[in-house]
Amino acid sequence: MEPKTAGIVRTQKMGDGVASYTIDDALMALGFGNFQILVLAYAGLGWVSEAMEMMLLSFVGPAVQSAWSLSPRQESLITSAVFAGMLIGAYSWGIVSDKHGRRKGFLITATVTSTAGFLSAFAPNYILLITLRCLVGIGLGGGPVLSSWFLEFVPAPNRGTWMVVFSAFWTLGTIFEASLAWFVMPKLGWRWLLALSSLPSSFLLLFFKMTPESPRYLCLKGRTTEAVNVLEKIARVNGTKLPLGILVSDNQIELHNIGNPSEATNLLSPRKDEGEPPKEMNTNLEGISSLSMLLSPKLARSTLLLWVVFFGNAFSYYGLVLLTTELNNRHSECRPSKFQAEKSQDVSYRDVFIASFAELPGLLLSAAAVDKLGRKFSMSAMFFMCCIFLLPLVFHLPQGLTTGLLFGARICITATFTIVYIYAPEIYPTSVRTTGVGIASSVGRIGGMVCPLVAVNLVHGCHQTVAVLLFEIVALLSGICVMFFPVETMGQDLRDSVSSLKQINTLH
């Protein structure tokens, strides 16, 4: 199939009149083949690892509370410590990845996650367990690095569909963890569950040497020879050929097209190395510089809206998981807090296992809509549908109806979570892609930390109506924010520089 944009770029002549092509042209020509399947499998394993480490919190907390006679507040801190670590890690690893490469980013995160996760199984006391779980959270904060890495190997027309497939690994991880807990916890206990759940991140280290660096990242950094080597490897594995000409970056094309580089000097800084393209601002960006770029005039609107949507997604997703347990255990009754604490140790592994399958229809919905209806419409529609499912729960309903409504709401919020993880890396240029997604993910972790106060404390305090209305407001505001995103990225090429975003924004 002839690449959609290749004809435009290949006819352009650089300074010496030589035909050229971009990373997007190359990926279009190479197609989605066996090489991308291998990249998907590796990145998907990392997503399975993160899902398992998050899912096990539902089982380990009550077990540790029972074993060490912890208070409910101490139990909740086990979960909060993981989210706090993720808050730190998502920002830190995003900067590392954008500065030193995608591979280095997920190498560090996999090392921290696997080591701290395995050692936490041997924690002799509560303080050390909290510390190690916080370190696990820091490692898990690197999840956006893997998603961005995979995204940068996928041709634009297939990006939405394959990112949904990538998101399916999260659902696979939650189901696998629920299954593992069902068999391990009653016989072997929580320490074995912690140890076994750390294995997927260990496998990431085992196969790390086989992973390639993102050619888009290499091209941005002026390492075009290495980028071409990766692209040639993709061509060999996929049985295809690269376009004719030389590989160029968006920065080079931008400078060539404007003719007068003075317009770009505010965003681009020239390289001293001959033959290498100028870098955006300064490649040795500090964290504050990356943040200032994300809040620059061309990105500020998208960034701020994305933070709200990530917060709303995490708040709603983790809250619905907790509400499913709380409302079904309580039916429409309101029990004393002491009785609730005594019953908190009883976890129905079977019910949690079944509830995990609610995410499968959500994935199918997002797969059907994301490349047909667009990212923005799909996300906003699912947020509003979630509100419709939740609204009847302001009243006390029979258990069967309550379960059905929560099941439907979780389908919708799973779809929005899937799509926002596709959309977020697409709106940022390569130079700040993982930093932008990492910070947005960090804001989402704040939503994950806050939601137990609503899903658990308000319900325990006999305020189910208030709790549900708060979830309604958060989901509604998130859906409205999606409508105000300035860019629809469906079918668009990924961009390498902030200056090149101008070409997209003028189209919408």
Image: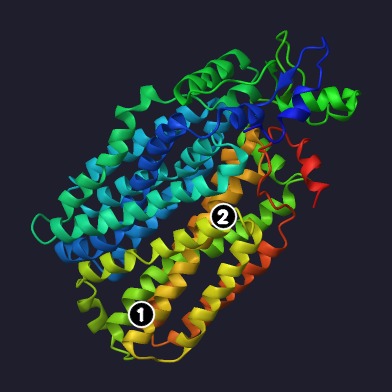
Q: Along the horizontal axis of the image, is 233 left or right of 117?
A: right
Image coordinates for residue 107, horizontal then vertical, percent: 40, 30
Q: Along the horizontal axis of the image, is 344 left or right of 218?
A: left
Residue that protrudes farthest toward the left in the picture: 187
Image coordinates for residue 294, horizontal then vertical, percent: 69, 44
Alpha carbons under labels 1 and 2: distance apart: 26 Å
Q: Which residue is mark 1?
A: 403
- Indicate the amino acid at tag 1: Thr
- Which secondary structure, mark 2? helix
Quadrant in which the N terminus is drawn? top right
- State whether residue 281 appears in this view: no
Residue 420 circle label: 2
Q: Quadrant of residue 188?
A: bottom left
Image coordinates for residue 434, horizontal then vertical, percent: 56, 39
* Above/below status of 483 relative to 325: above
User: As rendered, which of 239 and 359 lies closer to the eye?
Assistant: 239
Image coordinates for residue 398, horizontal then vertical, percent: 34, 91
- Identify the residue at image location x=59%, y=61%: 309
Q: Quadrant of residue 328?
A: bottom left
* Mark 1 or 2, nearer chain start: 1
- Which secondary structure, mark 1? helix
Q: Along the horizontal axis of the image, is 496 left or right of 399?
A: right
- Indicate the amino acid at tag 2: Val
